Image (tube, rainbow, N blue to C red):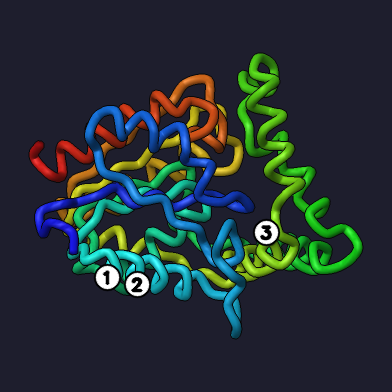
Amino acid sequence: MSEPDVVPVVLLHGFPFDATMWDDVVELLGERDVPTIAIDAPGAGESPVPDGEPSLDVAADGVAEVLEELGLDRAILAGLSMGGYIALATTQRHRSLVAGLALLDTKASADPPEARENRLRVADAAEGEEGSGAVAGMLEKLLGATTLATEPDVVAQHRAWLAAASPAGIAWGQRAMAARPDRFAVLEDLEVPGLVLRGAEDEIATQEDAEAMVRAITANGGDAELVIVPGAGHMTATEDPEAVADALEAFWRRVTGR
């Protein structure tokens, strides 16, 4: 049983990766005595693909189950991209567990029809002959222009991660994200501190998306901070882990008072 006053940062990864994408951030936060837990989403890493209709609510309930198993009453959720969608779903379904909400390179809106149809197309392709190749083309959208031009090792690592992604996990994740609802109401009702962070070169989660989430959190007097990471794209946690660790450490200290 964990000490009742331990409030960890729960790290929720992006698609189609797994919890290991947080390794550098976990190491940096560990050096600063910030407790972390990195969780695999359904179909990623060590987590199997669930039975039934794909839904991020299943992933959210999985987060709650992990915290219960660890004897933790509250945690700060930090989700990047799909992880942000899962963090929002967890906040909606298990509000009492959430001590703070950090949304990285993500959005609170549902997919427009064209984006939803593309997700379903990729899901079908992953289950067919393409396999993990169905997501290979994501590379240049995931990483910022600066990273693509100057960080060949980071580019190579992401290319390898995409190639290693489970086809069944790709299909489950895409269908679950396609089915997600708009969750701005969750932010408008948020009663805990919020952090919104994005890479300045992120072409997927835009500045408009980030500012809309901050507005929603603060609409009813909520507490939100917006952090922009220069020179990074959609994968801030792997493109600039130091900046992300700095932001999450500051947020953890703000929430916990330590």
**Type of residue at label 2?**
Glu
Local SS, label 2? helix
Residues at circles 1 and 2 in contact by the CB criterion of under 8 Å? yes
Residue 122, given in percent of the width and then of the height, sits at 77, 61
| Mark pair 2, 3: CA separation | 31 Å
Q: Name the image quarter holding residue 113.
A: bottom right
Of badges 2 and 3, nearer the viewer stands 2
Residue 65 numbered mark, or none: 2
Between 203 and 41, the residue placed more toward the observer is 41
Please rate how many residues cluster around mark 1, counting C-alpha atoms within 10 Å: few if below 14, some from 14 to 19, many from 20.
some
Residue at the far front in the pictured view: 1
Residue 68 numbered mark, or none: 1
Q: Which residue is mark 3?
A: 115
Q: Residue at x 81, y 68 (%)?
A: 127
Residue 23, given in percent of the width and then of the height, sits at 47, 38
Local SS, label 3? helix
Q: Residue at x 43, y 43 (%)?
A: 104
